[in-house]
Amino acid sequence: MNRPPQQTTAEALLRVDRVTAAYGSVTAVDDVSLDIAEGEFFALLGPSGCGKTTLLRTIAGFESPASGDIRLDGVSLLDTPAHRRPVNLMFQSYALFGHLSVEKNIAYGLEAERLPRAAISERVSEIMETIGLTEFAKRRPAQLSGGQRQRVALARALVKRPRLLLLDEPLSALDRKVREEMQLELKRLQHEAGMTFVVVTHDQEEAMSMADRIAVLDRGRLEQLDTPQSLYERPSSRFVAAFIGTANLLDGEATEHGVVLPGLGEVRAAHALAAGGRATLVIRPEDVAVARVPEPQGSSDGAGAEFVGTVIDATFLGGSSTLSVELPGLAAPLRATVHTATSIRRGDRVALSFDPARVVAVPDPRGRATGEPEAPQ
């Protein structure tokens, strides 16, 4: 497998160093290394079962790695029990105490540390005002909406002022509208608190909208660690290309200047792949230029990657239109996004072209060259 380089920096707040974690014979986290900077909003992203929650629980101290090390400010945490780590984990279920009021729920951790009553009252009042809970201070969790309960759980985690706040699928229980509002709220609070957040999510839009950097995991391994923009524009593997955003994935054979697609010819793309090896072209729908043509034409030599096909579906989505185009040699249609209303309709002949600077070629680990694009995801 084409493994990513070890993601380490000298000034990391948290360093995960070649961590492996297993449940019996099942390896949940496989030799993962990454650094998280102080004040960063960091996301662990991947499908169910990829190891992201296990890695989060290992950082928190609820799981022990089979090998590797986890260091905070350069000091190993492995011998420090979970309750003594300067780390707080906000659970997916929120785990609020139903018999306690909002302010009592928030104060619980501080009371367990036996802080002076005046200090507890001051810090609880301050965090309730910051998160917008002051008017709900005397209510119990059952009297709150899902979004309000989420805020209480977040306030309870923030009031202890941990060096690192871990959030396990924090927005999954909320409906779409509230979830979108809370994404903005989390980002605002993270900036205001100046704290380091690490969030686990399977929702790519959630990670892309909140995180400064994202670690994409698959089957326990780190596929790529990068900024949201770089993950989208320059994926390093077929998995990342398919998982992040929508993409046309076309399999073929690498050449010196691009990738040859069976039945179509060469599409130019800069890459460092060995000529003759299996490769996958990643073409985002918005990077496909579309023009109507009066009659069938031959394809070009690939310099502009122009090919002619037939529109089999056209969908107007308000600010853009999505076209599905059937091309000779491809068993599945290629999808293109036009960022305006278009007069192109089903049955029209169109020429498709791709800017080589926007086309990415990645290894095809499945070892086939059919030229068949996967359904965009």
Image (spheres, grey):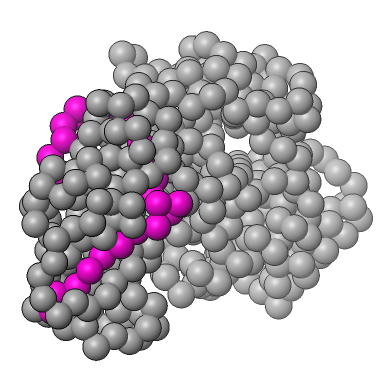
Q: Residue 84: in sight, yes or no?
A: no
Using the image as rendered, state which of residue 220 and residue 185 is in the foreground: 220
- Residue found at x 57% / y 23%: 6
- Residue found at x 70% / y 64%: 188
- Residue found at x 37% / y 83%: 340
- Residue found at x 26% / y 60%: 306
Compared to residue 329, the image places residue 324 above or below, namely below
Q: Position of residue 93 (x, y in %)?
A: 47, 51
Compared to residue 47, the image places residue 172 above or below, namely below
Compared to residue 176, the image places residue 155 above or below, namely above
Using the image as rendered, state which of residue 316 and residue 368 is in the foreground: 368
Q: Quadrant of residue 130?
A: bottom right
Q: Quadrant of residue 24?
A: top left
Using the image as rendered, state which of residue 300 and residue 91 is in the foreground: 300
Q: Position of residue 228 (x, y in %)?
A: 54, 51
Q: Position of residue 108 (x, y in %)?
A: 70, 49
Instruction: Write down the region rendered in magenta.
Output: 348-372
Count the numbered circles shown: 0
Asked if residue 78 lies left or right of residue 223, the reply is right
Q: In the rendered image, which quarter contains the C terminus?
A: bottom left
Asked if residue 372 lies left or right of residue 28, the reply is left
